[in-house]
């Protein structure tokens, strides 16, 4: 790393990193949960799961939006010495930092299927959809500002997954062509 520069990770990529694992773990847990009759029965389990899916998606998508918006508005221009982290590295760091939490959530979703079939899995899948929605919202903000938003890697926390946490004091901005991820954190085509 150049003297005076910092490692920077894309905020939208960090947000989006958990979406796919939560979605797929949720889908698998709900599918397996459908095989079990449960205490409440499949029909009640699926209806409760649908409500939990919607609730989780909305809560996750709208949580901390004011904090993200404030960070986006106050973003300073990144310097030439700053090192931009690749999308794949950011995603890998997030998933490594959260692998045990993901596994624990999957096991809990499966276990809950003995009581309420499919509900736990649908809750996980809803959280994944909420993260996709939040990343999409961040992408629209980045397009409107015509700047990609980055955060210092050392401020992301131990598990590399808190782009709007307390340690984050400010963000950096680059042009929309910087890095290997499109606005919103998706792979650049």
Image (cartoon, rainbow, N blue to C red):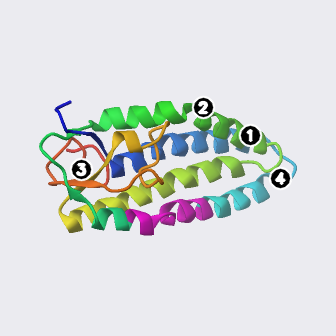
Q: Please give the name of the residue rendered at 39% of the width and 62% of the height, measured from the top-left corner.
A: 68
Dominant SS in magenta: helix
Where is residue 121 shown, x and y percent of the image? Answer: 65, 46
Q: CA distance from mark 1 to mark 3?
A: 39 Å
Quadrant hosting residue 59: bottom right
| Drawn side of residue 127 relative to residue 76, left or right | right
- Residue with the mark numbered 3: 182
* Circle 3 or circle 2, nearest the eye: 2
| Drawn side of residue 188 relative to residue 21, left or right | left
Q: CA distance from mark 2 to mark 1?
A: 25 Å
Residue 188 lies in the magenta stretch: no
Where is residue 145 shown, x and y percent of the image? Answer: 21, 66
- Residue with the mark numbered 1: 35
Residue 63 lies in the magenta stretch: yes
Residue closest to the eye, 12 or 113: 12
Q: Which residues are magenta?
A: 54-68
* Circle 1 or circle 3, nearest the eye: 3
Screen quadrant of the N terminus:
top left
Mark before the other along the chain sequence, 1 or 3? 1
What is the secondary structure assignment of the residue under circle 3?
loop
Q: How many residues crowd mark 2 within 10 Å: few (<14), some (14–19), many (20+)?
A: few
Q: CA distance from mark 3 to mark 4?
A: 44 Å
Q: CA distance from mark 3 to mark 2?
A: 29 Å
Q: CA distance from mark 1 to mark 4?
A: 11 Å
Screen quadrant of the C terminus:
top left
- Residue with the mark numbered 4: 41
- Residue with the mark numbered 2: 100
Residue closest to the eye, 56 or 113: 56
What is the secondary structure assignment of the residue under circle 4?
loop
Mark before the other along the chain sequence, 2 or 4? 4
| Drawn side of residue 115 relative to residue 49, left or right | right
């Amino acid at each position: 790393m150049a003297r005076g520069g910092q490692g920077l990770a894309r905020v939208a990529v960090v947000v989006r990193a958990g979406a796919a694992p939560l979605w797929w773990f949720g889908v698998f847990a709900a599918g397996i949960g459908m095989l079990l009759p449960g205490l409440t029965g499949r029909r009640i389990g699926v209806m409760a799961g649908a409500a939990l899916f919607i609730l989780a998606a909305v809560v996750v998508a709208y949580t901390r939006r004011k904090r993200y918006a404030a960070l986006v508005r106050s973003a300073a221009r990144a310097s030439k010495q700053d090192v931009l982290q690749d999308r794949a590295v950011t995603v890998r760091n997030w998933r490594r930092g959260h692998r045990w939490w993901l596994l624990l959530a999957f096991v809990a979703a499966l276990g809950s299927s003995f009581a309420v079939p499919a509900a736990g899995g649908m809750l996980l899948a809803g959280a994944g959809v909420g993260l996709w929605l939040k990343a999409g919202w961040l992408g629209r903000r980045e397009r409107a500002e015509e700047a990609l938003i980055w955060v210092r890697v050392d401020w992301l926390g131990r598990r590399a997954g808190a782009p709007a946490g307390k340690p984050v004091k400010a963000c950096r901005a680059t042009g929309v062509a910087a890095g290997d991820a499109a606005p919103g954190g998706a792979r650049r085509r």
